[in-house]
């Protein structure tokens, strides 16, 4: 008996990776959805008895899908597949009825193990191998999925160190001119004041800078979370900025390097500006950046007034190497 399966993920690369890691002997009919709302319609139509569900998606995220499945008592066994590897994320999806959790990027071994553990793989076997559907995945989509996984690694480290839950967005990835950078920073209001940290990085054929834009209104709460005795002391601000940058930038770059099988060397962090607007910051440093591939992630800590933007700016000369590396993931 053929089993109807749903792969629900906004990333074409992630859908392709998931489909090709399913056991070849498994007799399944695969449907696809690019957001939670589409996914729910597939499940309601009886085409998602087993669901591989991403968490960070537009329109409706994975948590909302799980809540709807519970509320409507829909017949679906859900396995969450996500780059958000925080312990609290695991706990929340389990509480919402998810069968289990698989960390991105997925592997054939991890999929087989979990299917065998729950007796799912034996439900329907076939003699011939499954043909993995062909996908058209553009490089921007691939970059976004790479950023998504790296974002989850960085959030997990920050959450573990501070015992908090980090709320994750969908990464924003674009090739931009410097004049477009301000517009690219969706989470930063024109009037808000930020302090900025910059850290250069370089690898084989790839170079760029990581910017941490820390909202000034976040300093006091972050200082408390880091255990500073005088959280309102402005002298702590530089320390908070650098410590946050070390965690987020280092973990994010490690996440990218692992996925692309390349090493990065990081420079020393430099404070670019304090208590300024993003417009002022970019104007004062515009000579440093030209056309760039930009990855933007806005991190927020639940139940705390902490918000910061991590922006990775790859040089234009890095794009061919990144395309080459990403090509291996697309094959």
Image: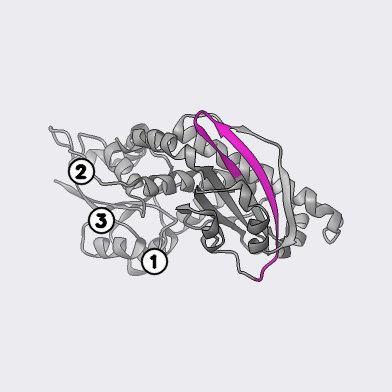
Quick check: marks 2 and 3 in contact, CB under 8 Å? no
Dot 3 corresponds to which residue? 48
Along the polypeptide, which appears first: circle 2 or circle 3?
3
Q: Quadrant of the C terminus?
A: top left
Above or below, 239 against 44 in this view is above
Residue 98, percent across and down?
40, 53
The numbered mark at residue 59 is 1
Dot placed on the residue nearer the N-terminal end, 1 or 2: 1
Q: CA distance from mark 2 to mark 3?
A: 17 Å
- Give the percent coordinates (x, y) of residue 68: 37, 67
Q: Is residue 321 magenta?
A: no
Mark 1 falls on what kind of element?
loop
- Relative placement, left or right, of 147 versus 9 is right
Q: CA distance from mark 1 to mark 2?
A: 25 Å
Q: Please state the extent of the stretch shown in magenta in the rendering.
A: 191-209
Q: Residue 310: which disc?
A: none
Q: CA distance from mark 1 to mark 3?
A: 19 Å
Q: Position of residue 277 (x, y in %)?
A: 68, 64
Characterize the local packing of mark 3: few (<14), some (14-19) or many (20 or more) Cα atoms within 10 angstroms: many
307 relative position to 324: left or right: right
Residue 142 sits above or below residue 258 on the image: below
At mark 2, the secondary structure is loop
Reading the image, the residue beneath label 2 is: 133
Label 1 crowd (10 A; few <14 / some 14-19 / many >=20): few
Give the residue displayed 35% in from the left and 62% down from the top: 36
* Whether residue 159 can be seen here: no
Residue 264 figure quarter: top right
The quadrant where residue 260 appears: top left
């Amino acid at each position: 008996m053929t089993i109807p399966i749903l792969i629900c993920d906004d990333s074409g690369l992630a859908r392709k990776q998931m489909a090709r890691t399913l056991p070849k002997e498994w007799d399944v009919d695969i449907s696809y959805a690019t957001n939670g709302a589409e996914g729910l319609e597939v499940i309601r139509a009886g085409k998602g008895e087993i669901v591989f569900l991403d968490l960070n998606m537009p329109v409706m995220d994975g948590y909302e899908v799980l809540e709807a499945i519970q509320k409507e008592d829909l017949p679906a066994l859900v396995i969450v597949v996500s780059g958000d590897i925080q312990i609290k994320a695991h706990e929340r999806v389990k509480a919402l009825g998810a069968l289990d959790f698989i960390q991105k990027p997925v592997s054939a071994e991890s999929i087989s193990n979990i299917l065998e553990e729950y007796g799912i793989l034996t439900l329907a076997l076939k003699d011939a191998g499954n043909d993995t559907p062909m996908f058209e995945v553009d490089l921007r989509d691939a970059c976004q999925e790479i950023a998504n996984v790296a974002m989850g690694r960085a959030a997990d480290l920050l959450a573990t160190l501070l015992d908090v839950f980090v709320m994750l967005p969908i990464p924003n990835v674009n090739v931009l001119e410097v004049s477009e950078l301000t517009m690219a920073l969706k989470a930063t209001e024109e009037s808000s004041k930020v302090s900025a940290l910059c850290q250069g990085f370089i690898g084989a054929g790839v170079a760029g800078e990581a910017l941490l834009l820390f909202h000034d209104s976040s300093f006091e709460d972050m200082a408390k979370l880091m255990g500073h005795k005088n959280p309102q002391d402005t002298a702590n601000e530089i320390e908070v900025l650098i410590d946050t940058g070390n965690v987020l930038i280092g973990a994010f770059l490690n996440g990218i390097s692992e996925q692309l099988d390349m090493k990065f060397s990081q420079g020393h962090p430099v404070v670019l500006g304090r208590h300024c607007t993003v417009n002022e910051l970019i104007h004062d440093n515009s000579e440093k950046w030209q056309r760039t591939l930009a990855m933007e992630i806005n991190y927020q800590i639940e139940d705390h007034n902490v918000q910061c933007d991590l922006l990775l700016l790859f040089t234009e000369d890095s794009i061919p190497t990144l395309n080459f590396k990403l090509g291996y993931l697309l094959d």
